[in-house]
Amino acid sequence: MAKPKYTSHVGMVDILPDESPKWRALETIIHEEAAKFNFEEIRTPIMEQTELIVRGIGQLTDIVSKEIFAFEKGDSHYVLRPELTAPVVRAFVEHHLEQRGGSQKLYYIGPMFRAEKPQKGRQRQFHQFGAEVIGSDDPVADVEIIALMIRIYQRVGINNFELKLNSVGDPESRETYKEALRSYLKPNLDKMSELSQKRFEKNPMRILDSKEPEDQQFIESAPVIQDYLNEDSTEHFEKVQQYLDQLGINYTIDPHLVRGMDYYTRTAFELISPDLGSQDALAGGGRYDLLVEEIGGQPTPAVGFAAGMERLLIACEELDISLAEEKTVDVYFVTLGDAARTWALTHLPKAREAGLSATMDYKGRSMKAQMKDADRENALYTVIIGDNELNEGKFTLRNMKESEENSLTFEEILEKLG
Ligand code: AMP
């Protein structure tokens, strides 16, 4: 086949008709499980102000320093949203959602954009679902967020994952830890990557997240944050673990887990799948008690997760999980001649009103070609309509699987199939 003149952008993928049923099935599971946890859906614009994303996620993060798609129009600076926590918090502050009372339990599904190097499980337009609890610092909220995240994978049939857990401390603990980390790293800083050197002053904890080979030997024996958590943070972290234990949710503590955004405080977690190859993170999240204030709201504690939908679907493929059944159509009207075509066109709405999916030939093809087409469309039944049938008011209804035929009136057909 000739190369098409236009293609989608690198790393931006079409979800074609054969694929969309499993996406819809996944979305249905997310909506259902979120509803069971009493979360409400929020939908925000695809574009946000650049300033929000830079402040919200952090200037030195990979996302902001390398991966945002940004452009200007007039005086406005736009960015395609790379994640949804900062936009959801923006919406929370902008619309004073705290006035609704209680904690805001919000979830979302939608496309995100990051200018990353595409590979399996990593795209430039990808999809996330996620949830946020804004307005509670209770460890119960952390654990409910983790439980919702895990529940969705379990509903899908993915049970093979590892939950990694850490506490990145509150601001006080972090300051003490950052000092300890700086003193430890300083003697070898000139041997470390440029990026780590850049992070050293402002955010040395992100150095622990470095993938650069030259940094690894120094990271391995770095001090761990658990030794620097103050009483409050320690107690919070212990409660999270205790509740996870009580729910029977397994986890491993990973003291180097810091996650990619600057806004995390206390709980941080990641869900890893052994079925995914190098891009093995299914989902991640944590507590971000400082973000609401950073974005201009009143100090409000919050916790959330974000999960990659493409990666979930890749894991399904690896595990042979099919989320959607094969597409079918209940009834295909096979028409012979003009009068039959008109009759079919005007009776399709009646079949659809009766709750059936119904279609007909759009190309004026022969009966044989129409039967073949009905087969290709996975029609469960065909109704054969010609002049004789129209005169008699009786039609041949064919059960395509059983190859069984009945002569019935249209009303009888609707009754039988409905
Ligand atoms: P993050 O917002 O970076 O914590 O990412 C949360 C989840 O989104 C990750 O665990 C991945 O499953 C998914 N994800 C992040 N970036 C991409 C990407 N470029 N392509 C596909 N999935 C992604």
Image (spheres, rainbow, N blue to C red):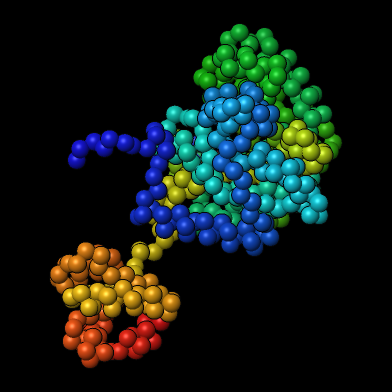
Left or right of 283 on screen, residue 357: left
Q: Quadrant of the N terminus?
A: top left
Image coordinates of residue 201 in percent, x first then y, are: 70, 16
Left or right of 244 on screen, residue 13: left
Q: Residue at x 64, y 63 (%)?
A: 36
Image coordinates of residue 292 in percent, x first then y, are: 75, 38
Q: Residue at x 79, y 24 (%)?
A: 175
Name the quadrant containing residue 182: top right
Residue 317 visible in the shown view: yes
- Point out the residue furthest to the right here: 231
Q: Residue at x 39, y 64 (%)?
A: 325
- Point out the residue furthest to the bottom here: 392
Image coordinates of residue 320 in percent, x first then y, are: 39, 55
- Seen in the picture, residue 403 relative to 216 is either above or below; the reply is below
- Seen in the picture, residue 384 relative to 49 is either above or below; the reply is below
Q: Nearer the viewer, residue 68 or 346?
A: 346
Q: Nearer the viewer, residue 356 or 140?
A: 356
Residue 122 visible in the shown view: no
Image coordinates of residue 315 in percent, x first then y, are: 45, 48
